[in-house]
Every structure is written in C-alpha cells, then in structure tokens.
Amino acid sequence: METAVYQPGTISTRILGAVFLWLFVFSGGFVFREPAPYELFAVVLIPFWFLAGLPLPRQIAPLFVLLTLYLVGGIIGLSQVKFLDDAPMFVAVTGFLALTSWFFACLIAEDHRRLKLITNAYLAGACFTIILGLIGYFRLVPGAFDLFTLYGRASGGFEDPNVFGPFLILPLGLLFYSILNREEGSSILRIFFMSFLLLGIFMSFSRASWGLAAFTLASIFLLSLINTRSSGDRLRMVILLFVALFAGFILLLIALSIDQVSSLFAERAQIVQNYDGGRLGRFARHAFGFRLVAERPLGLGALEFGKHYINGDPHNIWLKSFTAYGWLGGFCYPILVVWTIAKTVPLLFKPRPWQPVLIVSFVVFLGHQIVGIVIDIDHWRHYFLLLGLIWGMIAAEAKWSADHKHQEA
C-alpha cells in the first residue's frame, strides 16, 4: 500500500520545497568551514517543513532522545572550558546536525519515496565535489591546488581528505547494489558514475575511505547473495565481482603509472603512519584520553582535548564523545549505535520498496563505526544524514506493518 505523499502548501510551494530539499542535500558536499552552507539551508528549510505540519513519528523517539542527551552533554561540557573561543559554535553545529538527522527521519517516515530525491541529490553533490578535487589535484585552474587539496591529497569541497573520501561511499554503495541486483535503469551509466566515485575515493588517499569502500562493497555483495534466491542470479553476481576486481586492478595500474600518484600511494598505503604510533602518536592519545576522562564526568569540553595533550584531536569518535560531551554523551553514543543496529538488522531481509537504500545505508553506517576508531566523525554531515535515513526507514517499516495489519483485519 502506497502512503500518501505529504507536501506543504500549494503546488508552487511543494515544488519549491522539493528544490530546496535537493539543494540542501547537494550542499552537503561542500564544507570548507563551519558553519557551512549546509547549516544555512537547514536554518531555513527545516522550520518550513515542521511549521507546515511535518509530523514527528514516535518510532524515531530513540534517535531524538539520545541525540538530545548527547547535545546536552556537550552543553554541560562547556562549563569545563577555560576560554570559550570556538567551543560554543562547535556544540551549536552538533545541535544543527542532530536536527538534520531528525528532519530526514521524519521526511522518510512520512513518505519513503523521498529517498529517490535525496539519493539523487547526494550523488550529484558527490560527483561535483570530485570534480573540484580533480581540478585541484591536477592544478587545472590557478589556485585550485591550495583550495581543493590538502597535503597533496584531493579534498574536493571539504577541509579534509579524510571527510571527502568517506562522503563518497554511500552513493558508491547504492550504485553497486543497483548493478548487482539489476535494478531498472542504465547499468552502463551506473558503472560510469561508480568508476568516477572510486576515482575520487582513491585520489583522497585516505586509508579510512579505502577500507570503508572495500568493507561496503564486500558487505553489499554478501547481503545481495543472501537475499537472492535464484542460483542463476548468484552466479551472475559472482562473475560480476571477478570482472569488477579485474577492471579495478587495471585502473589501479593505470593510475600508478603517474609518478605523482604512485609516490603518494606508496606513502599512504602503509598501515601505520609516523603519526599513528610512538609516544605522541594517535594511539597513545587514545590511551591517554580514556584515562583522562575516567576522572572527568563532565568531560573536558568541546575542542579542549588538544589543549590537554599535544598533537591534536582525539581522532576516535568513542573517545571524542566522552571528552567533548562528557559521560552523558559518551554513554549515549554507543547506546544509539547498538540500538540502531538492533532495530535495522531484522529489516535487512524484508522485501520493501526502501530495502536497497536501507541495506546500503546500514552497511555504510556500520563501516563508519569502524572508521570512527581512528577518526572523529561527530561533525560529518553525511553521517547524520545516514542516521536520519535509517531511522526514517525504521519508522516507515512500523507504518507499513500497521497498514497491512489493518488491511488484513
């Protein structure tokens, strides 16, 4: 049973709402600094939808409550900051991102067909930010190298290549799933866009995004095999996998034939970089940080960790949750992750119109928890979008089940 589409206002208002929603998602690929254009769209767009009557379904209550408590922990943590500086803005951005998560969950819960507009806008934003990264990396425009790269690595519309790369994973997974499962549309066009996304991920020279891409593609392949009952389709998937691996190997050899690329690849391919190990390395900071927050229930306050320990941020979302958001945020974050996983796993194997997006979103979400061990992901716009999409589909499932029970009765 198809649910009615909610759109605020007249036809012209509905079109305007859809256009701004598309632009809002599209702008997620351009975060040079905070607050970003993404936040500016949120300030205008989200109140518009809620004031127009967009409902807040009770099924997303765990997302709402846990993110609210997470934010409260950050606000309380400001009391531990000696000089506020940028700390209040940091917590405010966290609040905005939490709001975007609730917003996307409400949109999808009410009408899952909005997933198509959102994912199309995301793909467009991903492709455009890759173009910026390539323009910068290959110095195609004067000044572009300084603007769209960092440490010789493509960063596109982001400050950091380690955010640019993971941002591209969701559309990559969606395209891969659609090719594997022969969804309606041009496979050749999807292969082209998928290759373009892989190029962007490679040029980020981010070990985290490389690993996340491999994890995502492997997990989608496995789940597609499980959900496919036809032995012929399974054989086709296996053949496609080997063809893709061979094509990827050839493309990698071509890329490595460029001296500029091969030298940076050799450097970044090392599992442990010089800033990871050692007395002042990333992993030493993790151990130090957990010992430190064990004695600080209110945390250290936003952006304070680097001031307590030389060599920068925690680079660990689990530790960051405790340092910036106190014990309240530190415990709310893993609870939210576990709750999300527990609610989503049973839905992965139910044939629903949103199943492809749910499978890919869940896999990418799970991969982000692994990546979060070595990177702070608490201000990644696309991560909060993922959370919103997943909880929106959880709520949509509850609505779907209730409608079908009512029909049967």
Image: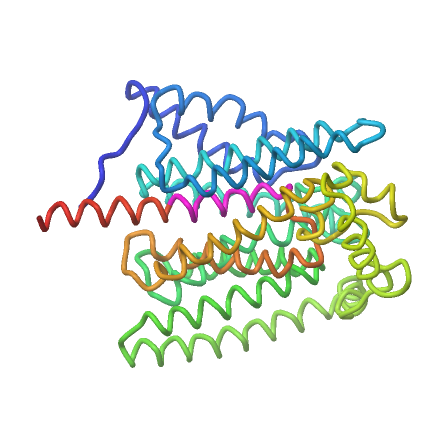
On screen, residue 297 above or below 191? above
Q: Position of residue 267 (x, y in %)?
A: 81, 66
Quarter of the view holding residue 287: bottom right
Count of numbered labels shown in the rendering: 0
Dominant secondary structure of the residues highlighted in magenta in the image: helix
Which residue is located at x 87 percent, y 41 percent? Answer: 307
Which residue is located at x 59 percent, y 32 percent? Answer: 95
Nearest the eye: 23 or 387: 387
Tell me if residue 278 is in the magenta stretch: no
Tell me if residue 389 is in the magenta stretch: yes
On screen, residue 295 above or below 203? above
Q: Position of residue 313 (x, y in %)?
A: 79, 47
> For this view, does 45 lie left or right of residue 180?
right
Nearest the eye: 166 or 301: 301
> For this view, does 250 lie left or right of residue 122?
right
> For this view, does 154 lie left or right of residue 175?
right
> For this view, does 297 lie left or right of residue 233?
right
Nearest the eye: 26 or 364: 364
Which residue is located at x 69 percent, y 41 percent? Answer: 326
Q: Position of residue 346 (x, y in %)?
A: 36, 61
Quarter of the view holding residue 301: top right
On screen, residue 260 above or below 148? below
Which residue is located at x 40 percent, y 25 percent? Answer: 49
The range drawn in magenta is 379-392
Nearest the eye: 313 or 319: 319
Q: Position of residue 223 (x, y in %)?
A: 40, 69
Coloration mode: rainbow
